[in-house]
């Protein structure tokens, strides 16, 4: 019996040391990746977390709502897309701001249409590239503005931008705004 307890204690200690070895190896690999790739990994992870956060908050806030996906552009009323310097849809609309103020800028979309409409925002950058901004959004209906978020943590480049509203299931632009980011 004494021999069995002795082997059990040895196996337990060996298991603990093995786990410590695996944990230290994982930490070392993460450290090396962090040193080699630096800010790229951190900014990529931040972007992924922001996308997940936005998608989850939009998904949770829209539970129980019925949303429209229009394929006929004639069904879609024009939508207004605009920017404000405050988290207030009634705030002063802006078309120009400096890079240092990018974290204060909020994006909004509103429509007089009563039905809920799912839509995407497409942002055209100064270099001419175009990418979807944020997840798929949904209008609040009845003229209420829909909050469409802000820029991420990385400062955007200076230049001319364009933001377009495209209803989900359509290729028709139903609203747009151009804005300038200065130094």
Image: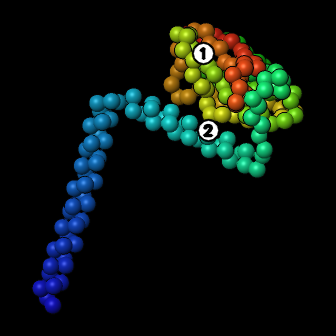
Which image quadrant: the N terminus? bottom left
Give percent across and percent down for residue 107: 69, 25
Does residue 107 show up?
A: no
The correct choice, above or below, for 61 with respect to 152 in the image is below
Provide the residue designation for mark 1.
124
Residue 114 in the figure: left or right of residue 24: right
Q: Are marks 2 and 1 in contact (CB under 8 Å)?
A: no
Residue 80 figure quarter: top right
Residue 175 figure quarter: top right
The correct choice, above or below, for 100 with respect to 27 in the image is above
| Picture mark count | 2
Give percent across and percent down for residue 123: 62, 19
Residue 94 in the figure: left or right of residue 48: right
Labelled disc at residue 54: 2
Residue 16 in the figure: left or right of residue 107: left
Q: Decide which of tag 2 and tag 1 comes sooner along the chain.
A: 2
The correct choice, above or below, for 181 with respect to 14 in the image is above
Give percent across and percent down for residue 49: 52, 39
Q: Nearer the viewer, residue 99 or 22?
A: 22
Residue 145 figure quarter: top right
Give percent across and percent down for residue 24: 25, 51
Q: Residue at x 55, y 36 (%)?
A: 50
Label 2 secondary element: helix
Q: Residue at x 62, y 34 (%)?
A: 135
| Distance (Cα) linking label 2 and label 1 | 20 Å
Q: Nearer the viewer, residue 25 or 123?
A: 123
Which image quadrant: the C terminus? top right
Q: Residue at x 45, y 30 (%)?
A: 43
């Amino acid at each position: 019996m004494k021999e069995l307890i002795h082997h059990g204690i040895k196996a337990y200690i060996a298991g603990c040391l093995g786990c410590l070895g695996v944990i230290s190896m994982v930490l070392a690999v993460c450290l090396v990746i962090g040193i080699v790739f630096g800010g790229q990994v951190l900014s990529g992870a931040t972007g992924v977390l922001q996308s997940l956060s936005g998608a989850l908050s939009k998904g949770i806030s829209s539970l129980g709502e019925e949303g429209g996906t229009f394929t006929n552009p004639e069904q879609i009323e024009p939508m207004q897309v605009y920017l404000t310097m405050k988290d207030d849809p009634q705030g002063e609309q802006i078309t120009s701001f400096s890079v240092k103020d990018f974290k204060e800028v909020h994006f909004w979309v509103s429509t007089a249409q009563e039905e809920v409409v799912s839509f995407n925002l497409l942002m055209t950058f100064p270099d001419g590239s175009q990418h979807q901004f944020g997840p798929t959004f949904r209008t609040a209906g009845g003229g209420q503005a829909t909050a469409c978020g802000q820029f991420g943590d990385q400062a955007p480049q200076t230049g001319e931008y364009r933001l377009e509203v495209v209803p989900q299931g359509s290729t028709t632009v139903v609203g747009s705004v151009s804005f300038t980011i200065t130094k």
